[in-house]
Image: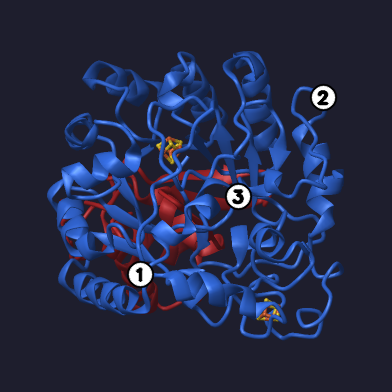
Amino acid sequence: MVELIKLKSDDMPKLPRHAKLRYDEARKKWIINAPERVFELDEIAAEIMQMIDGNLSINQIVDKLANKFENAPKEQISKDVIIMLQSLADKGFVIK
Amino acid sequence: MMQKNSKIECKKTSYLTPEKKSKMLIPYAVLCELTHRCPLSCPYCSNPVQLEMKSNEVNTEIWKKALTEAVKLGILQAHFSGGEPTARKDLEVLINHASKEGLYTNLITSGVLVNEERLKKLYDSGLDHVQISIQDTDPKNSEKIAGFKGHNKKLEVCKLVRKVGLPLTINSVMHRQNLHNLKSMIELAVELDAERLEVAQVQYYGWALKNQTAFLPTRKQLDNATKVVEEARIKYKGILAIDYVVPDYYAKKPKSCMGGWGRQFLNITPAGKVLPCHAAESLTFLDFDNIKEKPLSWIWEHSQSFNRFRGTDWMPEPCRSCDRREIDWGGCRCQAFALTGNADAADPACEFSPYRNVLEEPLSKAGTDTPKFIYRKF
Ligand code: SF4
Ligand code: SF4
């Protein structure tokens, strides 16, 4: 049974086996393959998805992004990251 | 292979970039019909009426080459289907190859030929997802529709799929003979721990057209089914995703078939012919190129069959000046041809189609006596 999960900032999210992240040469884009659907990721989504490997907490991911994108306020980044990961978690494509 | 709704959905949230208008279209998925052999004989099977014999089947090496070419072309997902794909002994080899090349692999099966050991092998080969068809929840009716005694075996295999750790979609073609059991089908999918239930509709060409009167549901059945789905979607939110579309004949606008002809998808037949849609061989005036003779990328870009209905240039009125022409692409070509004899016509499922009246006769018969099935056979 797919469990409904609510992500918190100290969770360490990862992709389940049936969701696969990879770079697609033809589209020049990162994508996630999942049953009967494909998520095409933009630059920031791709950055985030490459970091969610079950070893980094959402807080740590936000820190890394904040270092990289210096002019974005950290609270905003944190909010955006959680919204994005939660929307995937709601569909069962992100677990913790 | 069972009837399918359109396969690929591109989610767009603020994080996901909208599709760019590029000149060269990049396909998302390939449906590999490995064989037409199948122990079942569903009377709505979407395989062509003229089935390929085993001796015409493409060999392992050619399939591998095609899969490698598919990745280069930008294809992201490979669906292995048939007939019954597990009837091919080299299925593991092909899945392993596809998976190593980076393709997401999905097995579309009736389930009746596999056991736990085979499923484990498939899992180890890199299989990502399994889709099993169930004809009805009532075992007797299920076996009558399939023309095969295998209902319990299917249920057992569904459980084994989950046991070996693979995600599961149940595909159920719903029609007049089983729509009354839609609710129990949804419950069964939940009980079997499936992630998705695909409520597929019968598309009337080929075998299904021969059996149309038996399958076309009544308006009342449909309205009831839509209600059942709406309630179940709320009840099982986050537990079971349900794909459901109202069948063409009762809709006002056609569906975008395969996301548009030659835009997202290609299909390779057991004999190696490359089609823009699994039913395209019903368009008897088209020639199809073969992976034995030409590279997949050439076929995608240059073949006559892919270019024949690509884009909007081929469209006559009413599609030509319709603002939905890049939404539904004029609907299904195979349905237009099967029902009107004119493959360029707007899909008769469209309320603007001058041929809309061809649906009246079949619809007036919906709900009358059920004729005997004409089963799929060689
Ligand atoms: S006969 Fe049934 S199970 Fe076999 S390929 Fe056709 S639809 Fe699928
Ligand atoms: S007229 Fe053609 S494009 Fe317009 S809705 Fe009907 S089928 Fe689609």
Camera-side residue of B291 and A65: B291
Tell me, for residue B367, which label it has, or none.
1
Task: Report whether the residue tagged 1 is closer than 8 Å to ligand 1.
Answer: no
Q: Position of residue B156 (x, y in %)?
A: 17, 32
Q: Chain of mark 3?
A: B
Q: Residue B298, can we see it?
A: yes
Q: Nearer the viewer, mark 3 or mark 1?
A: 1
Tell me the residue that label 2 is attached to: B293
Position of B335 relative to B53 (above/below): below
The answer to which of B375 and B309 lies nearer the viewer is B375
Which chain comes out red in the rendered image? A
Please say if the residues under marks 2 and 3 sit with CB atoms less than 8 Å apart. Answer: no
Instruction: Specify the subunit that label 1 lies on.
Output: B
For label 3, the residue is B28
* Residue B20 at x, y percent in the picture: 70, 67
The amino acid type of the residue labelled 1 equals: Gly
Q: Is residue B209 left or right of residue B319?
A: left
Classify mark 2: residues with Cα within 10 Å, few (<14), some (14-19) or many (20+).
few
Query: In percent of the image, x 28 and y 21: which residue is there?
Result: B120
Which of the chains bears the disc numbered 2?
A: B
Q: Could you say where residue B188 lies in the image, as x and y percent from the top left?
A: 16, 52
| Disc 2 element | loop
For the point 28% across and 36% down, the residue is B166
